[in-house]
Image (tube, rainbow, N blue to C red):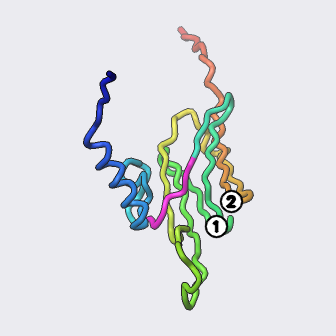
C-alpha cells in the first residue's frame, strides 16, 4: 500500500486560476510583479541572456508595430501597447470568445550591465523582440600619483 499525500489548498488554487481565466483575468495576474494596474491584458514574455546581450520576446499577435511603445527610464524597460478590437454588431455565431484586447503594459527592471543607448526593438509575425546589448566592461585603469 502506498501513501498518497494530498494538498487541500492545491484544488482551491487551481479553481482560482480557472476563474481568473474565465472572468477575463490572466492566470498569472496575481503572481506576476510586472503586471501593471490599468492594463487590460498581459502578453507572455520570454527573456534570455546571451554572451553579449539580453533578448526579450513578447507575444503580441494582432498588435501593429506602430501601436507599441518601448521606453527605458531609470533602469526600467517599459513595453506599452494596445490590441484594438474590431467592433461587431452582434456576436452571432460565436460560441466562445477568448482573445483579449485593450491596453497592455509590462515593466522590467534592467541590470546595470545593459547599455541603454543601444537598445533596439523589432516586431515580426506577432512577436516583439527587444535586444538589450550589454555595456562594454570597464577596464581597470592605473592612475599615476604625481609628486
Image coords of residue 71 (percent x, y): 56, 55
Q: Residue furthest right?
A: 124
Image coords of residue 40 (percent x, y): 45, 67
Say left or right for 122 vs 87.
right
- CA–CA distance in space, label 1 to label 2: 7 Å
* 103 shown above or below 50: below
Q: Main secondary structure of the magenta part?
A: loop
Q: Which mark is residue 19?
A: none
The answer to whether residue 1 is magenta is: no
Q: Residue furthest left?
A: 8
Q: Which mark is residue 126?
A: 2
Q: Quadrant of residue 17?
A: bottom left
Image coords of residue 13 (percent x, y): 32, 48
Q: Secondary structure at mark 2?
A: loop
Say left or right for 93 vs 23.
right
Give the camera-side residue of 25 and 97. 97
Q: Residue at x 54, y 76 (%)?
A: 95
Q: Are marks 1 and 2 in contact (CB under 8 Å)?
A: yes
* 3 shown above or below 69: above
Q: Quadrant of residue 8?
A: top left
Q: Quadrant of the N terminus?
A: top left
Q: Residue furthest top?
A: 147
Give the camera-side residue of 28 and 18. 18
* 67 shown above or below 16: below
Tag 1 residue = 63
Q: How many other residues sit within 10 Å of disc 1, few (<14), some (14-19) or many (≥20)? A: some
Q: Residue at x 56, y 91 (%)?
A: 89
Image coords of residue 116 (percent x, y): 60, 44
Q: Residue at x 54, y 57 (%)?
A: 43
Q: How many other residues sit within 10 Å of disc 2, few (<14), some (14-19) or many (≥20)? A: some
Q: Earlier in the sequence, mark 1 or mark 2?
A: 1
Magenta segment: 39-45
Amino acid at each position: 500500500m502506498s501513501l498518497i499525500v494530498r494538498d487541500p489548498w492545491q484544488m482551491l488554487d487551481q479553481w482560482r486560476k480557472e476563474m481568473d481565466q474565465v472572468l477575463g483575468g490572466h492566470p498569472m495576474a496575481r503572481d506576476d510583479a510586472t503586471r501593471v494596474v490599468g492594463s487590460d491584458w498581459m502578453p507572455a514574455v520570454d527573456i534570455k541572456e546571451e554572451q553579449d546581450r539580453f533578448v526579450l520576446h513578447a507575444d503580441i499577435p494582432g498588435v501593429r508595430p506602430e501601436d507599441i511603445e518601448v521606453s527605458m527610464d531609470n533602469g526600467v524597460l517599459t513595453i506599452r501597447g494596445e490590441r484594438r478590437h474590431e467592433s461587431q454588431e452582434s456576436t452571432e455565431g460565436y460560441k466562445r470568445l477568448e482573445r483579449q484586447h485593450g491596453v497592455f503594459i509590462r515593466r522590467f527592471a534592467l541590470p546595470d550591465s545593459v547599455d541603454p543607448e543601444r537598445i533596439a526593438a523589432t516586431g515580426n509575425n506577432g512577436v516583439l523582440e527587444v535586444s538589450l546589448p550589454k555595456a562594454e566592461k570597464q577596464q581597470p585603469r592605473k592612475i599615476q600619483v604625481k609628486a
